[in-house]
Image (tube, coloured by chain):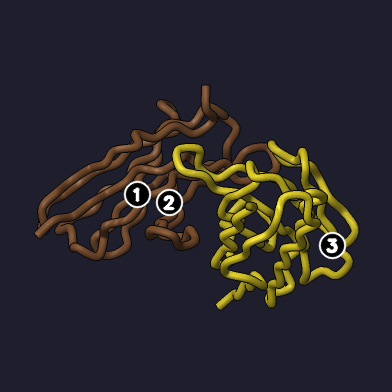
Amino acid sequence: DVKVTQSSRYLVKRTGEKVFLECVQDMDHENMFWYRQDPGLGLRLIYFSYDVKMKEKGDIPEGYSVSREKKERFSLILESASTNQTSMYLCASTPGGYGYGYTFGSGTRLTVV
Amino acid sequence: RKEVEQDPGPFNVPEGATVAFNCTYSNSASQSFFWYRQDCRKEPKLLMSVYSSGNEDGRFTAQLNRASQYISLLIRDSKLSDSATYLCVARGTDKLIFGTGTRLQVFP
């Protein structure tokens, strides 16, 4: 089974801190994604990457950046955390191609105080 | 208009009931479709792919109607363990588009 591992299950950070969320997948997948999920809003795409050192903005990239230095690792960075970034963050990966769904990590519940 | 639209529910059904969810998608060029299941405070997990010919996996049947641009999921003989949120998914130009989910609650 594909495993997508997110480094932290729960995280509490202070306003203004720089926050790093790490995601690692073990199946040599090309494509990786970062979402946030909030009640009533569903999954919203922040950033995605189709290859090493490549990144594309999703629907809500403001306040975030990403890094993909190695194929298996995709990091989400909150440059200066704010309370409105309190959310569940989900990483996903897929081999690419039309027939494949995404495999999600177990999520990081981030609280910014 | 959202690219993938679902009735948020909740659908409250007794054990043993048959329940059906529909969703509509706006991009007629979408080429692949899925249903995901998400338990409370957990990550979404792939339930099944959806094909034009329809597909069945045990008590679950998924159908795609390209002409009307809707996808359905039928659950027969509902179990308490089926209680979850079901996400409808269509492939957009270069990535998957997720609906906001339909909540199902199965009661004894």
Residue appearing at x 75%, y 41% in the figure: A61
Residue A93: x %, y % from top left: 66, 62
Amino acid on which disc 3 is placed: Arg
Instruction: State the residue position of label 1.
Output: B62
Marks 2 and 1, how far apart at CA: 8 Å
Indicate the quadrant where residue B20 lies. top left
Asked if residue B82 shows in the view, the reply is: yes
CB atoms of marks 2 and 1 within 8 Å: yes
Q: Secondary structure at mark 2?
A: strand
Indicate the quadrant where residue B102 lies. top left
Q: Image height check: is A13 above or below A4?
A: above
Residue B28: x %, y % from top left: 55, 28
Task: Answer yes or no: are tags 3 and 1 on the same subunit.
Answer: no
Q: Which mark is first along the chain, 1 or 2?
A: 2
Viewed as shown, does residue A79 lie left or right of B11?
Answer: right
Q: Image height check: is A47 above or below A72?
A: above
Instruction: State the residue position of label 2.
Output: B35
Viewed as shown, does residue B44 lie left or right of B40?
Answer: right
The image quadrant where one finds the C terminus of chain B is bottom left
Marks 3 and 1, how far apart at CA: 36 Å
Marks 2 and 3, how far apart at CA: 29 Å
Residue A55's label in the rendered image is none
Asked if residue A103 shows in the view, the reply is: no
